[in-house]
Amino acid sequence: MLYQLYETQRSLMEPLTDLAHSASKVYGNPLSLLGQSPFAQRMSAGYDLMHRLGKDYEKPEFGLRTVAVEGVEVAIHERIEIDKPFCQLRRFKRFTDDPATLQKLKEQPVVLVVAPLSGHYATLLRDTVKTMLRDHKVYITDWKNARLIPLSEGKFSLDDYINYVQEFIRHLQGSYGNCHVVSVCQPTVPVLAAVSLMASRAELTPLSMTMMGGPIDARKSPTAVNNLAMTKSHDWFENNVIYRVPSNFAGSGRRVYPGFLQHTGFVAMNPSNHAKSHYDYFRDLIKGDGASTEAHRKFYDEYNAVLDMDADYYLDTIRVVFQDFSLVSGTWDVVGVDGKTERVRPQDITTTALFSVEGELDDISGSGQTEAVHGICSGVIASEQKHLEVQGAGHYGIFSGKRWREVVYPQVKAFILTHQPTVQAPDSVASVPTKPVAAKAKARAKAVPKKVARKK
């Protein structure tokens, strides 16, 4: 019923927000009669703020058209590589007619960026992708809004998420020989599970995994987000935050955790900060500070755009990650696409380098939660592991903004390059490892546990 009430309210507010937008333009136009009032600028700013507070926010675009690669402007074509019922594997293909730059593009590492499915769209990682496109071939998981997915497509669970990630990794391995994986926040757990299962089956695993601000072990330095998930029962979540999609959407009848509830939770974490931000926006409109107002719009266009999550996936995540701690306890069983149940064993990973990144001031994934990955991935030799704590950075600062670009990214880039074969083949041809890389792989193979070696 709550979802239906929310949609009714949104429908009633829509004409009012449109009217506020029109009023803002009328008062903001000096040629109109109302625009000549001494209070016109304040009225225009007030109506503009009303419009933005009440409007509906749709999924933003990545909007990446070009990127500079070593001083040369390169065109970007965004396209869907794989289209699954609940996710699209999106590629940012780069084009140039400069032969030297083209050769550099072909030799650069391939990176799969696994975006969070935790309320926001993958476009939240726009800055992450834009920065990485300078030096990498970039693919990203673009998760779909569950309220737009018909019931005929079935349910979507955490196991399905893991199976999707494995499929995407195999796809890139088939095209390039291998790839690197970067996971941000929520997907650190399912990505680790996906790679662990591949390692246990003696499949080829990614060259490296970079894990940023994720709840690998949510027991460490629990945040307000963690505490809510830990103190409420599984039944409480199912009875209080799971609703069916209203009839005006394609996913009518699907059980979901609504995006508007997640957004409310985001805002409730720092209500005073958001109130101040909106007040500053109002003042900047009055002052005519175009740069500041545009920055505010860009941030909240992204922040306010939320999606619904399938109930099975959401409830699985609450139970596995925040209540049973199944990953670090070694009790997590996952059902594969073949219907077989397999135990997640991170200790079986031996040939994938591991880099963890945390923000000193992260209020979503607390200190030590991501670093815990090193303790459970005991099969990865110490020289192939690295941890970074970013001083002064909050959750978003480790993958977006100045600290990401100037502190985190240079180290991520260097880590990936260290574990990249010297010769990288173009799209449909496998990478050709050089002698040093082949020797390194051979050395790693010696570290494979006997149990895994016998499976090979």
Image: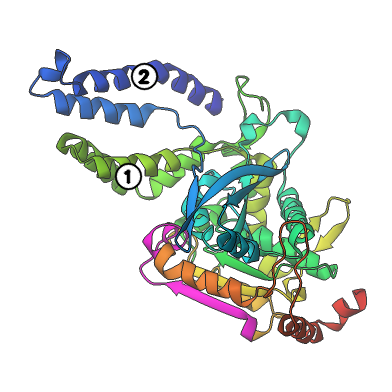
Q: Is residue 386 magenta?
A: yes
For mark 2, give the secondary structure.
Answer: helix
Q: Secondary structure at mark 1?
A: helix
Q: Residue at x 55, y 53 (%)?
A: 229
Q: Is residue 58 visible?
A: yes
Residue 295 badge: 1
Decide: few, some or many residues near mark 2? Use Cα within 10 Å; few <14, some 14-19, many ≥20.
some
Amino acid type at mark 2: Asp
Closest to the observer, 230 or 44: 44
Q: Residue at x 62, y 63 (%)?
A: 103
Measured as percent of width and height from the top left, residue 308 is found at 58, 37
Count of numbered badges drawn on the protein: 2
Residue 248 placed where, x, y %? 60, 19
Quadrant (top left/top right/bottom left/bottom right) for the C terminus = bottom right
Is 65 left, or right, of 361 in this rendering? right
Q: Amino acid at mark 1?
A: Ala
Q: Nearer the viewer, residue 14 or 375?
A: 14
Counting from the top left corner in percent of width and height, residue 12 is at 42, 17
- Residue drawn at x 55%, y 58% is 185
Q: Which residues are magenta?
A: 383-403
Give the mark nearer the N terminus: 2 vs 1: 2
**Is 285 placed left or right of 242 in the picture?**
left
Compared to residue 169, the image places residue 356 above or below, namely below
